[in-house]
Amino acid sequence: EARFDPPRLAVLSSFHYINHGGAELVVYRATPADAASGVRVGDRYFPGYPASAAGVDGADETTRVALFALSHDQELNAPIRLVARDAAGNEAEAPFDHRVFPQRFRRSRLPVSDSFLRRVVPDIVARSDEFRTLPLPPDADLLAQYLAINGGLRRLNRERLIALAAETATERLWDGPFRQLGNSQVESGFADHRTYVHDGQEVDQQIHLGFDLAATANVPVLASNAGRVVWADYLGIYGNCVIIDHGMGLQSLYAHLASIAVDTGDAVALGDELGLSGTTGLAGGDHLHFAILLHGWPVTPMEWWDPHWIEDRITRKLKAAS
């Protein structure tokens, strides 16, 4: 049978408050039930999932849940709307009430010493297959290789994170607030704008998209919530790296590990050991680089560590929809 009517969308949740660089959740109804639907934020798409798979009791097959984000690099006024497309190609979209809160992202200057270059660059060059795909003259010195790592390899690693997001489970695997590395100090914040300085000259600028958590050397790094390991291997600037999928597009990343104690495909619970902190990859000293990703896009971990935010932004809406 031919379909001529566009899908129908109705928002069921209320009070959608989005921090710039942060995440939010919406509960909605999309009919027909087989229409692909989600939230579009600017040019980025965040798919919806069956509300029953998110833990909404008694939800019918038209009720959906979507986690979405307003990324640090998007405009505060980026359009945010529900979208749907059915099998016949008919499309619909619907705005929904939301408020965006601006955030101040820090700026910092990072010295790049020759001893740092000698320590990190040869190891990454030797261990990263992706680095060898970058265009560099054969006689490139350590600084040129470092700039290729900090820019080109960083970009390739970002593309890998987006690809890994496609392996997310359709159901929610996590529960409650995420846990920060025990006894750790936050050394650098989310979306810090970094200017890199070598021999008094500004040589590069990048955005730091996670938290650096400093602890004593070689501390056990524990899973911040339950999920399934989708990456447990060397990953360019991140060095030895573990990525856990928590379902519905939500993933956590643990980088610069000295060693890895899990395998891809392993199911992990909150607090399971993933490996030991270290200095592999592009790390200035022993620390854990921790990131939260939503469909591959980094969002601030501060929200996911906060039990009040979890209760208000996520749990309240899922309960109300039950």
Image: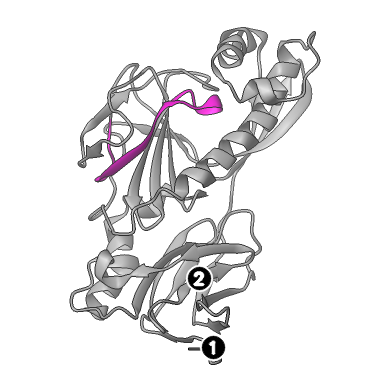
* Residue 230 falls in image quadrant: top left
Query: Looking at the rendering, in which quadrant would you find the C terminus?
Result: bottom left
Where does the image place residue 285, in percent across and percent down from the top left? 48, 18
Instruction: Say if the magenta span includes residue 227.
Output: yes
Instruction: Say if the magenta span includes residue 68.
Output: no
Question: Is residue 223 visible in the rendered structure shown here?
Answer: yes
**In the image: residue 146, left or right of residue 13:** right
SS for tag 1?
loop
CB within 8 Å, label 1 to label 2: no
**In the image: residue 42, left or right of residue 143:** left
**Where is mark 1, residue-wise?**
6
Tell me what residue is drawn at x 32 percent, y 17 percent: 218
- How far separated are the C-alphas under marks 1 and 2? 17 Å
Give the total of numbered labels: 2
Residue type pointed to by label 1:
Pro
Residue type pointed to by label 2:
Val
**Colour scheme of this structure image?**
one colour
The furthest residue to the bottom: 5
Tell me what residue is drawn at x 28 percent, y 23 percent: 261
- Above or below, 199 against 130 in this view is above
**In the image: residue 289, left or right of residue 132:** left
Q: Which stretch did the figure color magenta?
A: 222-240
Where does the image place residue 302, in percent across and percent down from the top left? 40, 50
Within 10 Å of disc 2 (Cα), the crowding (few <14, some 14-19, many 20+) is many
- Above or below, 70 against 287 in this view is below
**In the image: residue 69, left or right of residue 174:** right
